[in-house]
Amino acid sequence: MAVVGPSAPTPAQERDAEEVGAGLAVRDHVVVCGGRGGVMEAVARGAAGAGGDVVGILPGTGRADANPYVTIALPTGLGDVRNALVVRAADVVVAVGSSWGTLNEVAFAVSVGTPVVGIGGWALPEAGGPRRVRTVEEALAAVDALLAGR
């Protein structure tokens, strides 16, 4: 499961991301993220704290750039192009909040047919786009429902 979101989240987005990470980990999902700060660090902290594995797909070439909660750091040297790798590694993408980078990841996921669950964030058309939810519980229930259909 990929989790995407801003590198400068609000405190509420950071809490939501940490809860999403923990919720995915207790469901035995590997969490994939961009591996750095903000929502990426919060989701990694939540997943690692719940005993889960976190793959950080990094934009640069150094493993040391990963946040301390990443289990497997994959430096790509691809910059923002690595967003496509984050999305392609996922069965479902959970977007927490919004930023231009998050919008890029959501748009790519929608364009390749990867389901997206969005907590807050951009008001995008839902037909073929993100399934919008208000809470972490709703997001995790949506992920479970999407995976049950596969």
Image (cartoon, helix red, strand yellow):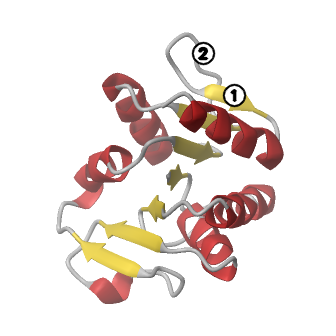
Left or right? Give the position of 109 relative to 149: left
Left or right? Give the position of 108 relative to 71: left
Left or right? Give the position of 22 relative to 29: right
Inter-mark Cα distance, 1 to 2: 7 Å
Helix, strand or loop at mark 2:
loop
Tag shown at residue 107: none
Residue at 46%, 35% in the rendered image: 106
Question: In the rendering, at what x and y percent does residue 73 appear?
Answer: 34, 78
C-beta proximity under 8 Å, tags 1 and 2: yes
The residue identified by callout 2 is 126
Which image quadrant for residue 87? Answer: top left
Question: In the rendering, at what x and y percent does residue 4 appear?
Answer: 52, 51
Question: In the rendering, at what x and y percent does residue 25 appear?
Answer: 62, 66
Helix, strand or loop at mark 1:
strand
Q: How many numbered badges does the structure rendering display?
A: 2
Residue ranking furthest to the top: 127
Whichever of labels 1 and 2 marks the residue nearer the N terminus, that label is 2
The image shows residue 53, relative to residue 145, as above or below, that is below
Q: Nearer the viewer, residue 94 or 150?
A: 150
The residue identified by callout 1 is 132
Q: Residues within 10 Å of mark 1 (few under 14, many from 20)?
A: many
Q: Amino acid at mark 2?
A: Glu
Q: Nearer the viewer, residue 92 or 103?
A: 92
Q: Nearer the viewer, residue 14 or 46?
A: 46
Residue at 80%, 57% in the rendered image: 12
The image shows residue 62, relative to residue 99, as above or below, that is below
Question: In the rendering, at what x and y percent does residue 125 appear?
Answer: 58, 13
Residue at 62%, 71% in the rendered image: 47
Residue at 64%, 63% in the rendered image: 21
The image shows residue 112, relative to residue 36, as above or below, that is above
Q: Amino acid at mark 1?
A: Arg
